[in-house]
Amino acid sequence: MSTCPQCGQENKDEARFCVKCGASLGAPSQAVAQPPAAAAPPPAQPPYQQPAQYAQPVPPPATYAQQQYAAPPAAPYPAAYAQAPAYAGKTRGGMFWIGALILLVAGVLILVSTWMAWGSGPGGFMSLSGWDWFDIGKAGGGGSGEVVNAFFVYSDGYPIFTGICTLILGGLIVLIAALMLIFRSKGLGGIAILFAIFALGMAITNMTTILRIEGISMGVGMYIFLIFSVAGLVGGGMSMSG
């Protein structure tokens, strides 16, 4: 006989189940299996959101469109236009132009004075021009203590510059005035003033010598030489201030 492990009922040895409780006699008593507890539902997931870098399209850089649609570079200017003249873009006031014109006129008249009378005797006799003094100096023949050459004559304490000096100084003043008008350069006005100072010094020296010689008066050529040497100074100063 076998005893039911569940209820203690005696059963036959060959019985497989208890006649009283129906428990199995071939294996130890087991508790009635309980159905498994329902699994807890998973926590609610928030709805999927696309990352910010993908949510909105990133606009291309501004230069991207310019690079894609930019017009091809323009062809460079010819070499003749690559460099502007030195005077391009220079503007000068009225004082500059007036001063440069005064310089030009002064230089021309200093040139002209070479062939006009620098001194004349009573009644206009014995008139000598700057070119006559050039011929006298070029001939030479000065004595002891005298200087006689084509540029300068010094005799008996009377110094005088010949007409070659007025030719050189007048020509230089004309040249500088022309360059000033062409290139609109104020800096050249200082050089013109320097030559005008030399001309004025020579004119004053000659005037003093002529006035010291008895019976000789100043001729129109010497007046022009003196006056337009001063005009050259004025014109140079005006051109530099304009």
Image (cartoon, helix red, strand yellow):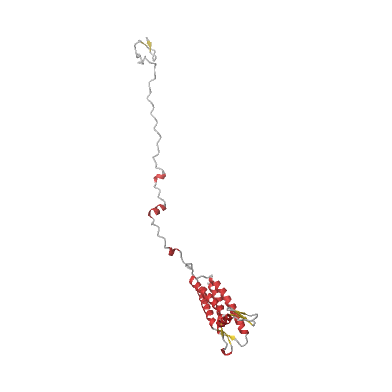
Query: What residue is shown at x 50% (from left), y 72% (from top)?
Result: 179
Q: Which quarter of the picture shows residue 140? A: bottom right
Residue found farthest to the bottom: 123
Name the spot of residue 180 as percent of width and height, x first.
Answer: 51, 72
**In the displayed image of the protein, which residue is found farthest to the top?**
1
Q: Is residue 111 left or right of residue 159?
A: left
How many discs mark residues in the rendered view? Answer: 0
Horizontal and vertical percent position of residue 76? 41, 60
Which of 3 and 242 lies nearest the eye of the viewer?
242
Decide which of 3, 98 is in the foreground and name it. Answer: 98
Can you see residue 93? Answer: no
| Quarter of the figure with residue 78 | bottom left
The vertical placement of 11 against 192, above or below, is: above
Check the picture and name the quadrant holding the N terminus.
top left
| 82 displayed left or right of 202 | left
Q: Is residue 63 visible?
A: yes
Horizontal and vertical percent position of residue 120? 58, 86
* Of residues 144 and 54, the one drawn nearer to the viewer in this rendering: 144
Task: Pinpoint residue 109: horizontal percent, then vertical percent.
Answer: 52, 80
